[in-house]
Image (spheres, rainbow, N blue to C red):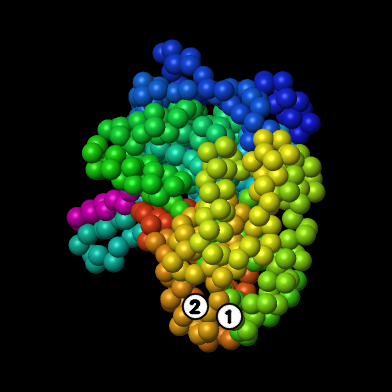
Amino acid sequence: MSMTTAQVFELASNQQLWAGHLIDTTVPVSETTLPNYSPIDNTCIGSIANGSQQDVNTAVTAARDAFEHGEWRRMSPAERKAIMQRWCQLMHDHMDELAALDCVDAGKPITECLNTDLPATIETFEWYAETADKVFGKVAPTGADALGLVVQEPIGVVGAVLPWNFPAQMYAWKVAPALITGNSVIVKPAELTSLSAYRLTQLAYEAGVPKAALQLVCGLGEEVGAALGQHMDVDMVSFTGSTEVGRLFLQYSAQSNLKEVVLECGGKSPQIVFADAIINEQTIEHILSAAFWNMSENCSCGSRLLVHSSQKEVLLTLLKEGLQSWKVGHPYDPEVAIGPMIEKAHFDKVVSHLNTAKTEGARLIAGGRIHDELGSGWYIEPTIFDNVSPDMTLFKEEVFGPLLAVTSFETEEEAIQLANQSNYGLAASFYTQNIHRAFRVASAIKAGTVSINGFSEGDITTPFGGYKQSGFGGRDNGLEALSQYTQTKTIWLVN
């Protein structure tokens, strides 16, 4: 039975929300738990299972047996498609419940969860369900003496290690393409945001996904995530999160079975406003969304605004006016756009960046207030700093909080140089009316996604991932994502 948002919020207030292991086994799993605190007011809303290496071993054993001998891989693509479509219908039926779980668990505004995250989550599953019987192998042009088949086979046991900032949506980005191609998938949700992953997996079983083909192991990254990365019988890990932890998964692979690893990591994305850009209401909306959407807890956050000097004063005035509609407050309020930081440690980090920007000489022109009177006190206004030079910390380091750094430039070449002056390369956006400049700049920027005259990560049809220290090994979304969950085999038949 689906719950309403009000019922989920009531359970949270009574500390009754739960996320546990979903492992296909008769062997007892660990019974230790972790309290689950909501960033909204730092109160306990329930608990999650605290997994161990043995729990991972148990899940991997079941996943391997399912892959080698179970039904999921051997179903026709059309059968897997039908099950996933039933799952999508259940997601539609439970949308309010799933959105409320992400709201209370991650502190995300409920309007954002209902209108953006959950629709995108369902769209991802629907889209990959449709690929099941529409993506084919190839026949090589061999001549009459042989037949060469190029086929894609599921890679095996896949570990999906999720971030905390988009719990349901990142579950979809990993699980949908991995599962539809016939793999056995083990999901490790972020310990800070496990609720929607638990509920989505339960709905998968209701739709007909075999339990051994999709399992959930909750717990800490240093225990469960590391165990998946180091396991000799896990064939592939897809991870979204910090670059620091991404490096660990590459080490785990090298130290174990050389498993495939796909990483989507940090970012310090530029937004560029050229002298010929049209600055209107839509432009302001896109720049602010790029900078502050999801409390800026977003890897593709456009946290560096590079502005031609001739445009800067007008643009900053309009940005300050536009921020007036970005209400900071309790995420249950449908009018709220900015909720809390995810946890105290992250809040402290963002505040430290705010104070460092002031100390290093950046000019505070909007926001900057900490709303310690709200709930947990981890609420920070969208904040804009001007006169941020490339040597300042705010220009160089990923903050993952609502601080926008503004830097002026004079020439196109300088703008490109500033945009690429980062260890990251996940996304970028720029504004111009010159079509020749648009192609030049889009080609010159070193980023996985470049949007012109608006902020976008693309959509489900386009691959998403990064250059440099923002990514490694593959892409989420698009048909390209399917390839990282499969292996290519050549079958050569001699006539």
Pick whichever, 272 or 149, lies toward us: 272
Q: Are marks 1 and 2 in contact (CB under 8 Å)?
A: yes
Q: Amino acid at mark 1?
A: His
Q: Position of residue 87 (x, y in %)?
A: 61, 37
Residue at 27% x, 58% y is: 148
Q: Position of residue 99 (x, y in %)?
A: 69, 39
Q: Position of residue 254 (x, y in %)?
A: 24, 43
Local SS, label 1: strand
Residue ID for mark 1 = 308
Q: Is residue 381 above or below residue 364?
A: above
Local SS, label 2: helix
Residue at 32% x, 56% y is: 150
Q: Main secondary structure of the magenta part?
A: strand
Pick whichever, 199 or 9, lies toward us: 9
Q: Which residues are magenta?
A: 486-495
Q: Is residue 163 visible?
A: yes
Q: Position of residue 272 (x, y in %)?
A: 56, 74
Total numbered labels placed on residues in the image: 2
Q: Amino acid at mark 2?
A: Ala
Residue ID for mark 2 = 415
Q: Is residue 79 above or below residue 451?
A: above
Find out whether residue 370 is within the magenta segment.
no
